[in-house]
Amino acid sequence: MLHWFLSTLASLIHAASPILKAYGLPAVFVLLFIESAGVVFAPGEAMVVAAGFLSAKGLFPVWVVLPLAMLAATMGGYTAYWLGDRYGHKALLRYGGYVGIRPPMVDRVHEFFHRFGAPVVLIGRFIVPLRQLQGYLAGASEMGFQAFATWSAIGAVLWVAAWGGGAFWLAQKIPV
């Protein structure tokens, strides 16, 4: 298990380090924002891990990287919520049939988010692709924005702290 975890971290760092070295902190913000706003293939997790690791090695100040990543993830989620709230429910009812989504399915998701929205949003930060899609789902399901905003922000802070802070902590244990 430990070997798998460490090899996964190494892969994430290897994939994202060239982007971070070339574009710096703006890359952290932009890529985390667009991933949280619903771009499933954006390398958000890799960015957080690599930024935490490179912070421990002196490339970035950790006191800037982690809050910046938390802000980007939170704001991206809020953007996805707004889009889902504004267009999602109507679009699912109107066009969902083209991709196999029927009105009873939309109603079940709507009910599910009203009942379990907070834990789904909080825990969803740690699950791909739910992390990228939860804002749309919550907005389209008419979950209240205040509840979504609170739990999404808490989830973003915990997610960045776990991955970015964890990579920072582990990198400090690795000799240069």
Image (tube, grey):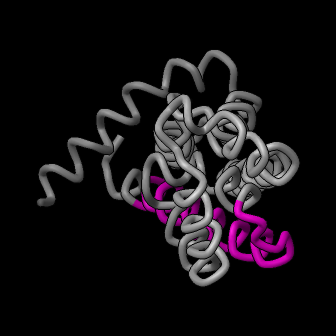
Question: 116 or 31, which lies in front?
Answer: 116
User: Is residue 123 depicted above or below 83 in this figure?
Assistant: below
Q: Which residues are magenta?
A: 141-169
Left or right of 2, for residue 39: right
Residue at the outermost bottom position: 115
Q: Is residue 160 magenta?
A: yes
**Taking 116 as reference, is 25 left or right?**
right
Quadrant for residue 122, please give it. bottom right
The residue at the point 83 percent across, 54 percent down is 85
Q: Is residue 64 visible?
A: no
The foreground one among 80 and 137 is 137
Q: How far across and down, in percent of the image, does residue 57 sit?
A: 50, 42
Residue depicted at 74% across the width and 40% down the height: 91
User: Which image quadrant for residue 103?
Assistant: bottom right
* Residue 60 position in % (x across, y down): 66, 40
How far from the left and from the top, in percent, is residue 171? Answer: 40, 51
Quadrant occupied by the C terminus: top left
Q: How many marks?
A: 0
The answer to whether residue 19 is above or below residue 160 is: above
- Front residue of 23 and 54: 23
Of 33 and 10, which appears nearest the observer? Answer: 33
Q: Position of residue 153 (x, y in %)?
A: 73, 68
**109 w.r.t. 37: above or below:** below
The residue at the point 69 percent across, 54 percent down is 135
Any part of residue 125 in sight? yes
Identify the image quadrant of the N terminus. Answer: bottom left
**What is the chief secondary structure element of the magenta stretch?**
helix
